[in-house]
Amino acid sequence: MNNARLPRLCLIEDDDIMGESLCDRFELEGFSRDWYKTGASALAGLTKKDYAVVISDIRLPDMTGDALFTQLLRQEANLPQFIFITGFGDIDTAVRLLKQGAEDYITKPFDLDLLMEKIRKLCARSGARRQTVTDLGISAAMRRIAETLPRLAEHATTICITGESGVGKEKVARELHQCGTDAAGSPFIAVNCGAITESLMEAELFGYEKGAFTGAARTKKGVFEQADGGTLFLDEIGEMPLAMQVKLLRVIQERQIVRVGGEAVIPINVRLVCGTHRDLKQMVEQGTFREDLFYRINVIQLKIPPLRERKEDILLFADLFLAEYAASHHAKKKTLLPATELTLLEYPWPGNVRELKHAIERACILSSNERLSVDDLFADGGIDQATLPQPDADLNGYLQACERRYIFNALNLHGWHMGQTATALGISRKNLWEKTKKLGIAAADKDPTGDQDKVERGAGAH
């Protein structure tokens, strides 16, 4: 067997006997592999090497396997495929890991032949790009969208993405495009309909022939032709004039365009994705948006919640933007002080993810501090401090509210697993349980897609 043709595996296992047995089998099957015995060494290795599949025990000497996976989700846009080895008592954790993006789990004692079969199947598709929740966020709402995109990519259905300005509609459209089997090399074209004047919109969308109008010195393809074979994202479709809506409807129905000043009919093969922050149905009732076009583009609707409704994503994106700034400027990555993180979680973010990105970039440019303070982001021309939440009564009350929000978000991030949340917060499980009681944090307040009794079971262990 030609070992060079087989992908590389990553094994994370602290038990010497188990690790040696698995490595022997991997080598017998012709796989190259790296074996890490701690979570820390695995983290370092996974950032430097490419692996097709990671086989990891959930219980490691320095951290849990799910804590390792969560940390990788926050750092990496494209993770290898994960199979977790779990004991009977860790099955709940394994199931939650599947919801977060892991591929599979196997329970001890396990059939080695079955494990190899799972690995071979995953390696067979290792060349395809995988979607992870990190691309769009770790909140339940964004995970649901991320899980939906691969299925949507299998069909040519027109999709409408709704949500406030700045929530990341174009990002979702790009991820949908990347999920397509022919995404490699195919174009993705994004156009903001609200930024094009009515007189130029037809030429921008459909192109024009040389001499079609004054200034048309050459023939130019429109965005429909430019996106042929790929995806066209028409953002702010609600800003399109009624006269232009008629022409767009015809193009969607007939899958062909005619350039301005031309006569030739040009067939097009485009996945059309539309975006809007407006209520199109209400616009139809008001007569400002065509009903027939509405039903054409609204076959599938993806609604992106505002950032204030998915606070779990705030610190994730903040960390991502800090890393992006450091990489693009060849600088050391800055971090946030704990008080700054709390403030970011409490701020309503009317400009959503776009506003957060601009705030982080501005602070990185203007501040010389390695750890950014509240003033670095919210003062001297930054975010208006008048919009920051004010303490209801006294300082103690305000700090208690901040602590409640911080612990609540930590519980959400770790799937309401008491032990893992306590470890992340640097406190004992008993201390965490006491704080949830004191601050009135109940499992009933969590995301409805999660395991409602996880917090109760975790507390009952003490």
Image: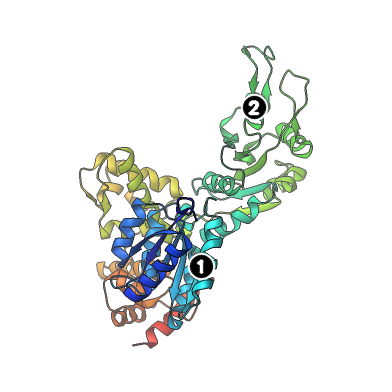
Q: What kind of element bears circle 1?
A: helix
Q: Residue at x 20, y 47 (%)?
A: 369
Q: Residue at x 46, y 81 (%)?
A: 109
Determine which quarter of the picture holds residue 93: bottom left
Q: Is residue 92 left or right of residue 206?
A: left
Q: How many marks?
A: 2
Q: Is residue 107 left or right of residue 383?
A: right
In three-dimensional space, the C-alpha distance between marks 2 and 1, rounded to whole angstroms, equals: 50 Å
Q: Amino acid at mark 1?
A: Met
Determine which quarter of the picture holds residue 396: bottom left
Residue 127: x %, y % from top left: 53, 50
Task: Tell which of 84 and 210 is nearer to you.
Answer: 84
Task: Tell which of 398 and 417 is nearer to you.
Answer: 417
Q: Earlier in the sequence, mark 2 or mark 1?
A: 1
Residue bearing the label numbered 1: 116
Dot 2 alpha-carbon crowd within 10 angstroms: few under 14, some 14 to 19, many 20 or more: many
Q: Are marks 2 and 1 in contact (CB under 8 Å)?
A: no
Residue bearing the label numbered 2: 222
Dot 1 alpha-carbon crowd within 10 angstroms: few under 14, some 14 to 19, many 20 or more: some
Q: Is residue 294 left or right of residue 387?
A: right
Q: Is residue 297 above or below residue 452?
A: above
Q: Is residue 316 left or right of residue 375?
A: right
